[in-house]
Image (spheres, helix red, strand yellow):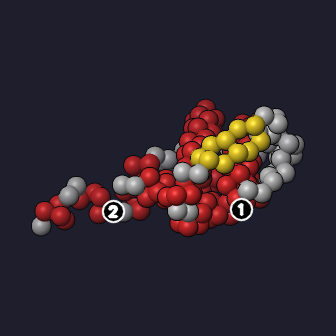
Amino acid sequence: MSSLSLLRTLFGYRAWANDELLEKLEGFDPERHQDARHDAIRLMNQCHVVDQIFAAHLTGRPHGFAADNTPDTPTLQALRSSVAALDRWYLGYVETVTPEQLSESVPFSFTDGDKGFMTREEMLAHVVTHGGYHRGEIGRLMRQHAVGLPWDTFAVYLHSTDPSRRQQGQLQAA
């Protein structure tokens, strides 16, 4: 499997996992779990802001953020819609980026003004791993408050999107 093929699969997984998690966040009672629900939305929003920052780095445009989170907390519905739109953007990006482009180093500035550079491939890997980290944090909050957890694993995603994987090679042997 090429790195580009893997990135495409990982971004499919990421979009699926984000959607599953944001749907399950509806299980937080806005009054009974007010603080935990707020913390979960803030964590997901921080992840989304970073995703927007890296999308801007990938396209060479300014991101317009002075920090890695917004001062105000969006509603869950607004966040869910915005995350889904950006997930679609990333899915489109990994469908059109070339292997040569993936290896290009891109200079950028962090929100604190420090300079850095990463290859496009490294940026995409960062977006995937950063999101997994924060979904894990949110999952911990959900577990602490007995809110139903999504079954967010890469293996579950692969087998749910390609049920033939459950055949364990039986189809190829036939």
Residue 81's label in the rendered image is 1
x and y percent of residue 157 in the render?
A: 44, 54
- Outermost residue on the left side: it is 174
> SS for tag 1?
helix
Residue named by callout 2: 163
Question: Image quadrant of residue 137?
Answer: top right
x and y percent of residue 5 in the render?
A: 43, 58
Q: Is residue 37 visible?
A: no
x and y percent of residue 131 in the render?
A: 60, 44
Above or below 153: residue 59: below
Q: In which quadrant will I find the N terminus?
A: bottom left
Q: In which quadrant will I find the C terminus?
A: bottom left
x and y percent of residue 90 in the render?
A: 61, 60
| Relative to 7, 146 lies left or right | right
Amino acid type, callout 1: Ser
Counting the numbered discs, the total is 2
The disc, 1 or 2, on the residue closer to the chain's N-terminal end is 1
Above or below 94: residue 146: above
At 23% from the left and 59% from the top, the residue drawn is 167
Question: Image quadrant of residue 81?
Answer: bottom right
Above or below 34: residue 166: below
Given residues 43 and 94, the one toward you in this image is 94
Q: Residues within 10 Å of mark 2 (few under 14, many from 20)?
A: few
**Separation of residues labelled 1 and 2 (CA atoms):** 28 Å
Labels 1 and 2 touching (C-beta < 8 A)? no
